[in-house]
């Protein structure tokens, strides 16, 4: 597969020089080849085997001795016991 690294860089508005472009192209080719090498599977096959149930570890709550209020002292802004972060979605 021929990957146009410089075209991708231009569309992504990324400045890239020739040496780095060759390295990125080689890495992308390896990634694409590894995906092509994945085995095929039958979509009608049932992957869940009820006779072989997956054993999960038990959730155990550990008390590390930290006080919530002491940890929140380091936050720049706190509201209702939670750290306030800037809104990124309108």
Image (tube, rainbow, N blue to C red):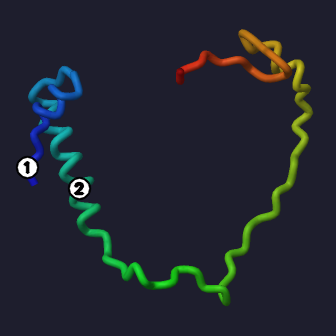
Position of the N terminus, as image quadrant, is bottom left
Q: Are marks 2 and 1 in contact (CB under 8 Å)?
A: no
Please name whichever residue, 60 or 14, is drawn nearer the observer in this view of the structure: 14
Circle number at residue 32: 2
Identify which residue is drawn at 31% across, 77% down. 40
Q: Position of residue 16 (x, y in %)?
A: 17, 24
Circle number at residue 2: 1
Image height of 88 relative to 30, above or below: above
* Circle 1 SS class: loop
Circle number at residue 64: none
Identify which residue is drawn at 74% across, 14% down. 75
* Circle 2 SS class: helix
- Taking the image as shown, residue 66 lies to the left or right of residue 13, namely right
> Is disc 1 surrounded by few (<14), some (14 to 19) or many (20+) residues within 10 Å?
few
> Is disc 2 surrounded by few (<14), some (14 to 19) or many (20+) residues within 10 Å?
few
Q: Position of residue 50 (x, y in %)?
A: 66, 86
Identify which residue is drawn at 80% across, 16% down. 79
- Taking the image as shown, residue 32 lies to the left or right of residue 64, namely left
Q: Position of residue 27 (x, y in %)?
A: 23, 46
Q: Position of residue 77 (x, y in %)?
A: 74, 11
Instruction: Give the total number of marks visible in the rendering.
Output: 2
């Amino acid at each position: 597969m021929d990957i146009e690294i410089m075209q991708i860089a231009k569309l992504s508005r990324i400045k890239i020089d020739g040496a780095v472009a060759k390295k990125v192209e080689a890495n992308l080719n390896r990634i694409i080849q590894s995906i092509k090498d994945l085995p095929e599977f039958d979509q009608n096959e049932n992957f869940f085997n009820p006779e072989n149930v997956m054993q999960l570890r038990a959730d155990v709550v550990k008390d590390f001795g930290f006080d919530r209020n002491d940890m929140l002292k380091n936050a720049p802004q706190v509201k209702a016991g939670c750290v306030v972060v800037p809104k990124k979605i309108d």
